[in-house]
Image (cartoon, rainbow, N blue to C red):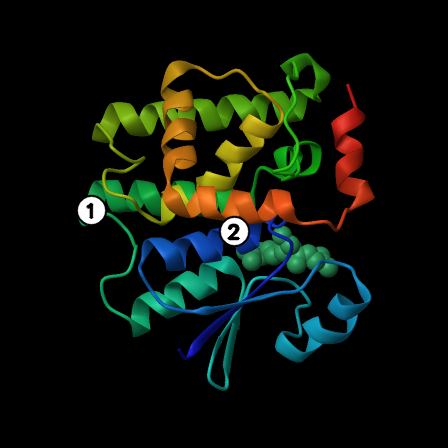
């Protein structure tokens, strides 16, 4: 097996999850190397793999690729039958736009609803800042609009990089018990039903490391 994927804690690392889910859904074999975030081991080992100091990192022999989107593009260009973009030009343009909208945005959701798969709460939207509330609404309408335009089963038809990008967002809504409009809930359910997501979540809840600055969000309201 030539590919190795360096990931962080499965409980907390949403960018690791994206790269991992992409490889799993693409049926690409790879070895998984987990570095628990911000531990002594992390501090010494992450620099061996990437000057950026973040996970995920893909190793293909001597080649290191970091950043989830770069990893997906690299794998797509070097392997065949890989999860990618819709064939239809309109759907493709849309899928690329929403995928990168996630990759470069939704900072308030990332800050106030951090990935924490062990946690299960029932929170009201009023608990969150107005910026976070409007980002949650943006995600809801974005998913609804996709299902209305392309008719499913996934956001832009077949499973694509857009679905990979939003899968961890769906899991955050589950963690914090955010009630969603039916079309948005439909996406959450699809994500939860994926075998790969169930495998990842099972490993995540079995992890023992804690990150207090993330767990602290459980108690805010
Ligand atoms: N844009 C990057 C984000 C990577 C990222 O922020 N990873 C987090 C874990 S989810 C990380 O490694 N944090 C460690 C740090 O910031 O020192 C990507 O798409 O891969």
Ligand 1 - quadrant of the structure image: bottom right
Name the outermost residue toward the left.
88
Name the outermost residue toward the bottom.
62
| Residue 8 locus on image (x, y percent) | 63, 58
Closer to the eye: label 2 or 1: 2
What crowding class fits label 2: few (fewer than 14 Cα within 10 Å), some (14-19), or many (20 or more)?
many
Residue for badge 1: 89
| Residue 178 locus on image (x, y percent) | 57, 20
Residue 207 in view, yes or no: yes
Q: Does 188 sit above or below residue 38?
A: above
Q: Which mark is residue 218?
A: none
Q: Residue at x 56, y 62 (%)?
A: 56
Quarter that holds the C terminus: top right
Q: Secondary structure at mark 1?
A: helix
Gap in angstroms between the C-alphas marked 2 and 1 = 28 Å
Q: Quadrant of residue 194?
A: top left
Q: Residue at x 48, y 51 (%)?
A: 18
| Residue 1 locus on image (x, y percent) | 39, 78
Name the outermost residue toward the front.
206
Q: Secondary structure at mark 2?
A: helix
Image side of residue 152 versus residue 133, left or right: left
Residue for badge 2: 17
């Amino acid at each position: 097996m030539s590919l190795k994927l360096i990931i962080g804690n499965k409980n907390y690392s949403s960018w690791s999850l994206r790269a991992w889910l992409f490889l799993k859904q693409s049926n690409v074999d790879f070895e998984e190397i987990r570095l628990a975030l911000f531990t002594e081991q992390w501090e010494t080992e992450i620099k061996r793999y990437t000057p950026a100091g973040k996970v995920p990192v893909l190793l293909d022999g001597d080649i290191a690729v970091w950043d989830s989107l770069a990893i997906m593009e690299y794998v797509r260009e070097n392997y065949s039958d890989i999860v990618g973009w819709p064939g239809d030009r309109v759907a493709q343009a849309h899928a690329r736009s929403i995928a990168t909208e996630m990759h470069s945005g939704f900072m308030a959701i990332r800050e106030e609803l951090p990935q924490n798969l062990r946690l299960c709460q029932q929170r009201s939207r009023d608990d969150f800042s107005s910026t976070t509330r409007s980002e949650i609404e943006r995600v809801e309408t974005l998913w609804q609009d996709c299902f209305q335009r392309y008719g499913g089963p996934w956001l832009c038809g077949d499973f694509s990089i857009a679905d990979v990008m939003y899968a961890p967002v769906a899991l955050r809504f589950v963690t914090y018990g955010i009630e969603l409009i039916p079309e948005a809930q439909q996406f959450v359910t699809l994500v939860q039903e994926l075998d790969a997501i169930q495998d990842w979540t099972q490993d995540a809840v079995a992890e023992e490391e804690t990150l207090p600055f993330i767990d602290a969000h459980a108690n805010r309201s």
